[in-house]
Image: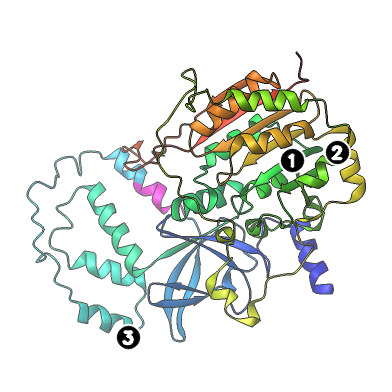
Amino acid sequence: MSTNKTQENSYKNNNRLTWEGCSVLLDINDGERMVFERLTAAATLKIGNKKCSLLPLIGCPFGSLFQVENGTDGSFLSRIFSTLEGNNDLQEEKESPTIHGSKDNRELVDNNTAQSLTGEDIDEMRRKGASGVEIIEALITNSATFEKKTSFSQEKYRLKKQKKYAPRVLLRRPAARSICEAYFKKRPEQIGFLRMDALALLLSMANVTSHSDVLVVDMIGGLLTGAVAERLGGNGYVCNTFRGTIPYPVDIVRIFNFGKEICERIVSSSVTELCSSSNLTSVSSDQLEDACDTRIQSNGEVPSSLLTLDTGEIMIPSEDGNTQKISPETSASPALKPYKGTKAGQKAPPDAIKSWRENGFSSLIIAAPQVDAWSMVKELLPLLSFSAPFAFYHQYQQPLALCMHNLQVGKMAIGLQISEPWLREYQVLPSRTHPHMQMSTSGGYVLSGTRIHGFE
């Protein structure tokens, strides 16, 4: 019990430092590999064929950089502290730009004969306890073409060898941006292909602020629920609603390292329970039926006024497939059980449900790529208070266009718009700032608007 209190106090008072039992995002070799881990004394991380203990990461600030080193007891993670050495090198380059000005790579031939250091020599250096930095310097010294390369090519060569012989691990805080970025890069299907800029647009269009009561339909593993709870900061409620009797899994929420106060504000309630009130008839059933009927013409085709997009089959995993384990390595050992605090997603208290039935929610966010958007909207929109904003996400445009048309016909919302977020990432380095060569083409679509009282 005292351990739980200590961990909670550590989160509240000094959450810029890691503590035992917290979740972290380990960025290996500048995004080459991203791993979620829970820090314990027995936790390990496998990098290549080397297994390193994560004990040195406990108590370090988020943003710390570590490097794999070779020791007498095996490989271990050593923290790297920033120095002014890199800035001095850049200053020397600016002061003497003609040193490398005449160099180019036109005369270099990649025939695997430039390196005189063999694999046996490198293994011998490792047996003698040479560090990764020493091996890299030996490779540079024994390269016949290194000095003939441009400064940019030399840095590229050094970075390539550093990733192989001296991997680096960046200790990142698991926040909404970093978690979304990691999932979108490695397993985007588990979060419905939701990109971080689309997530930010959802929160902005739904006006998620402190002391709000947000109704959420989260079928992307809990990323949306965690992002809303992170923005609320323990002030207000996140009600995760669902159809049927079993709530949708929100396992990603555990990665956020939320304290007790925030976890208590993440609740769940079924659609049936929230709708079982007589005061939710402001939008009549006739209006809902009329709006639903108008989306399909007599010949069964979509009206020509709607935006259409040939998307083909939507490949989205099932509800059970959204379950995400924190780490396959840590979950396999009984000694690495995660810290058990207040569990997020408990049943909403009766007084809160009563208040929501009477006053409505302050905003609605839906990210449910596995169900029909309109069927979900016509059930949940009456649960909002009047003039409350809403935002719906979908990977494709057509389901949102149908939903938008039905809302317009039913006169249930104003300010309707479908937005497609556009993101371009840039590499920002001295003398070589340019857009990244490979970027995602689309981050999905967001339908937003404001709920109004239906009228004839």
Q: Nearer the viewer, residue 264 or 83?
A: 264
First in sequence, mark 3 or 1: give its number.
Answer: 3
Label 1 residue SS: strand
Residue at the spot x=60%, y=37% of the render?
373
Discs 3/2, front: 2
Disc 3 from disc 1: Cα separation: 59 Å
Left/right of residue 90 with respect to residue 250 in the rendered view: left
Residue at the spot x=45%, y=55% of the render?
186
> On the image, numbered disc 2 is attached to which residue?
356
> On the image, numbered disc 1 is attached to which residue?
215
Identify whether 375 is placed above or below 307. below
Callout 3 touching callout 1 (CB < 8 Å): no
Residue count near mark 1 (Cα–Cα under 10 Å), binned few <14, some 14–19, many ≥20: many
Is any atom of residue 271 visible in this view?
yes
Q: Which of 240 and 88 is in front in this view?
A: 240
Q: What stretch is highlighted in magenta?
A: 83-89
The amino acid type found where label 1 is placed reads Leu
The amino acid type found where label 2 is placed reads Trp
Disc 3 from disc 2: Cα separation: 67 Å
The amino acid type found where label 3 is placed reads Arg
Q: Is residue 85 magenta?
A: yes
Q: Nearer the viewer, residue 7 or 76?
A: 7
